Structure formats: structure tokens, C-alpha cells
Image: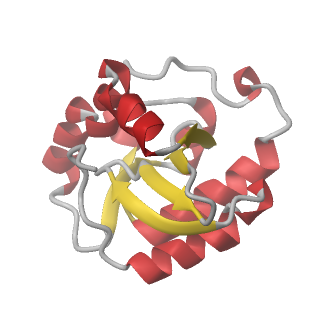
């Protein structure tokens, strides 16, 4: 399956992080299929179900089989979110290119508030982002999103 992602630099460490940080979701992660420059992940569990991990929304969504995952990744909105061209361009200009194993993301306060301002962008290792967002997601998963994300998805 191709969808314009980047190669996961340390797949074993990233998969271990997924299992540790997002294990509370009861998904038995088997493989990371793809990663975006903003840390979004397409993953497969041991039963063959594809999942989309959105670190910005602190959300893991079951997509279904490969055909369902391909259909999801082909949607215009998903492509826009996955590529995040404006955010990636702003982050690259402000922070430089990511190093091997790094992605762009937002500060913790920006993740929780929904602030997509360019000054909130950071470079972080994918493994650290997985641990961070899994822990945050566990802490807020029973709260309505409007209590911790007040801003619109993109500015």
C-alpha cells in the first residue's frame, strides 16, 4: 500500500512504544505500515485490522481490512491531514529538516488546546511522540474533545 508516507526509522522501537503507550486501547499492534512527517501512523494489528493513529486528536481509529484502509487514505481530507503541507513547510522553515527518527508535532499545551499556530511546532522523535500522545490520550479519553481541544483542526 502506498500513500506518500515516510519510512519509520526504528520500527522495532516505535512498535514497542505503540504497544506500551497505546496498549490501554486493547489493540495488539503488529506492524507500522506508514508514518507521516507530522507523526500520524497507519498500523496493522495481529488480527490484520488497519488502524489510523492521529497524534493531533489523540485518537486511534480502526479502519478495517486493507481495502478499507486504502479507501480511508485515498480520501481528500485524509490526504490533507496526512501530508499537512502548510504545517510541514512552516516547521521546516522554522525548525529545519527532521533528523532520522524525528517528526514534527506540536507542544503538549498545543496538543491539548488544539492550537495549530506555527510557533507551537516542535521536532520530536517518533518514539517519544508515541509515548507522549498515548499517555495523553489515556488521560483524556473519557472527556468530551471540546474540554481539551478548543481550536479547529487547521487554521
> Which residue occupies 22% across, 30% down?
86
> Which residue occupies 65% across, 71% down?
19
> Which residue occupies 50% across, 17% down?
152
Colour setup of the view: secondary structure
Q: 155 or 144: which is nearer to us?
A: 144
Answer with left or right where residue 25 lies relative to residue 90.
Answer: right
Q: 142 or 25: which is nearer to us?
A: 25
Residue 60 screen position, x and y as percent: 61, 44
Does residue 120 lie above or below 17 as drawn?
above
Q: Locate the C terminus by quadrant.
A: top left
Q: Which residue is at the far right?
A: 142
> Which residue occupies 44% across, 52% down?
41
Number of numbered discs visible in the structure rendering: 0
Does residue 95 lie above or below 56 as drawn?
below
Residue 67 screen position, x and y as percent: 41, 38
Does residue 20 lie above or below 104 as drawn?
below
Answer with left or right where residue 139 lies relative to residue 145.
Answer: right
Report which quarter residue 30 is drawn in: bottom right
Residue 109 screen position, x and y as percent: 59, 43
Report which quarter residue 135 is drawn in: bottom right
Does residue 65 lie above or below 98 as drawn?
above
Answer with left or right where residue 65 lies relative to residue 79.
Answer: right
Answer with left or right where residue 128 lies relative to residue 96.
Answer: right
Amino acid at each position: 500500500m502506498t500513500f506518500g508516507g515516510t519510512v519509520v526509522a526504528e520500527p522495532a522501537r516505535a512498535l514497542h512504544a505503540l504497544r506500551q503507550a497505546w496498549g490501554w486501547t486493547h489493540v495488539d499492534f503488529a506492524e507500522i505500515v506508514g508514518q507521516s512527517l507530522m507523526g500520524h501512523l497507519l498500523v496493522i494489528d495481529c488480527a490484520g485490522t488497519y488502524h489510523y493513529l492521529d497524534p493531533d486528536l489523540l485518537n486511534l481509529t480502526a479502519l478495517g481490512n486493507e481495502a478499507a484502509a486504502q479507501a480511508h487514505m485515498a480520501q481528500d481530507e485524509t490526504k490533507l491531514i496526512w501530508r499537512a503541507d502548510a504545517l510541514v513547510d512552516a516547521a521546516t522553515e522554522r525548525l529545519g529538516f527532521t533528523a532520522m527518527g524525528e517528526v514534527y508535532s506540536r507542544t503538549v499545551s498545543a496538543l491539548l488546546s488544539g492550537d495549530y499556530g506555527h510557533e507551537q511546532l516542535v521536532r520530536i522523535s517518533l518514539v517519544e511522540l508515541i509515548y507522549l500522545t498515548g499517555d495523553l490520550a489515556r488521560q483524556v479519553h473519557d472527556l468530551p474533545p471540546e474540554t481539551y481541544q478548543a481550536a479547529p483542526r487547521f487554521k
